[in-house]
């Protein structure tokens, strides 16, 4: 995932040229025109992943969230992590095994924030999903139309199951 704020671009995770997942976090400076790897002092960080999503937590807070993604061949998760830029620390906000309520889509989801809530829409539950073109052309994928809300204050997921006439199931936002 990649995001920008102020004079910086932040890039987390991805695949190496040898198709290995990475959990490196890098920051590019428009001012100095260089990249710096951000290594947390406590060593805590998410496992490597790709096809994950990232959003800023708040307009005046220096942190961002990453959600989901493929963590390796045949593996994915629905973890939600926060990275605090000022403290250079990762915090696991929600682990997909800590509750029965969490988004059903783990990869290729839509992710947005409004006020102190994060919303996840759609996505693919298949742990083998790779590329969007392959998803639409092959079977064995479970594309969802679920809408889930994560409250940043109490750190709980809620399924918004009373949504009237949701759009068709979607993936690859």
Image (cartoon, grey):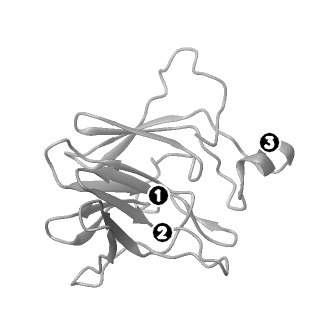
User: What residue is drawn where x is 57% and y is 21%?
Assistant: 166
Is 11 displayed left or right of 107 in the figure?
A: left
Residue 20, image x and y in percent? 62, 79
Residue 28, image x and y in percent? 33, 65
Q: CA distance from mark 3 to mark 1?
A: 22 Å
User: What residue is drawn where x is 19% and y is 45%?
Assistant: 153
Q: How many numbered circles are shown?
A: 3
Nearer-the-camera pick, 59 or 49: 59
Is 146 displayed left or right of 97 in the figure?
A: right
Quadrant holding the C terminus? top right
On residue 13, the disc is: 2
The relative height of residue 63 versus residue 112 in the rendered view (above or below) is below
Proximity of marks 3 and 2: CB atoms separated by less than 8 Å: no
Q: Read off the residue under disc 3.
A: 136
Q: Read off the residue under disc 1.
A: 1
Frontmost of labels 3 and 2 is 2
Which of marks 2 and 3 precedes in the sequence?
2
Secondary structure at badge 3 equals helix
Nearer-the-camera pick, 137 or 98: 137
Is 98 displayed left or right of 52 in the figure?
A: left
């Amino acid at each position: 995932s990649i995001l920008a704020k102020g004079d910086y671009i932040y890039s987390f995770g991805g695949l190496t040229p040898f198709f290995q997942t990475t959990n490196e976090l890098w920051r590019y400076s428009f001012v100095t025109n260089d990249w710096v790897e951000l290594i947390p002092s406590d060593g805590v960080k998410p496992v490597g992943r790709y096809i994950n999503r990232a959003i800023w937590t708040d307009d005046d807070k220096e942190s961002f969230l990453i959600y989901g993604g493929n963590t390796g061949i045949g593996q994915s998760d629905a973890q939600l992590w926060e990275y605090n830029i000022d403290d250079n620390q990762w915090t696991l906000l929600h682990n997909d095994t800590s509750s029965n309520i969490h988004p059903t889509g783990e990869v290729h989801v839509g992710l947005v924030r409004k006020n102190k809530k994060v919303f996840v829409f759609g996505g693919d539950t298949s742990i083998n999903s790779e590329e969007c073109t392959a998803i639409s052309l092959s079977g064995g994928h479970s594309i969802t139309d679920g809408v889930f809300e994560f409250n940043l204050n109490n750190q709980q997921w809620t399924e918004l199951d009373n949504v009237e006439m949701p759009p068709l199931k979607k993936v690859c936002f």
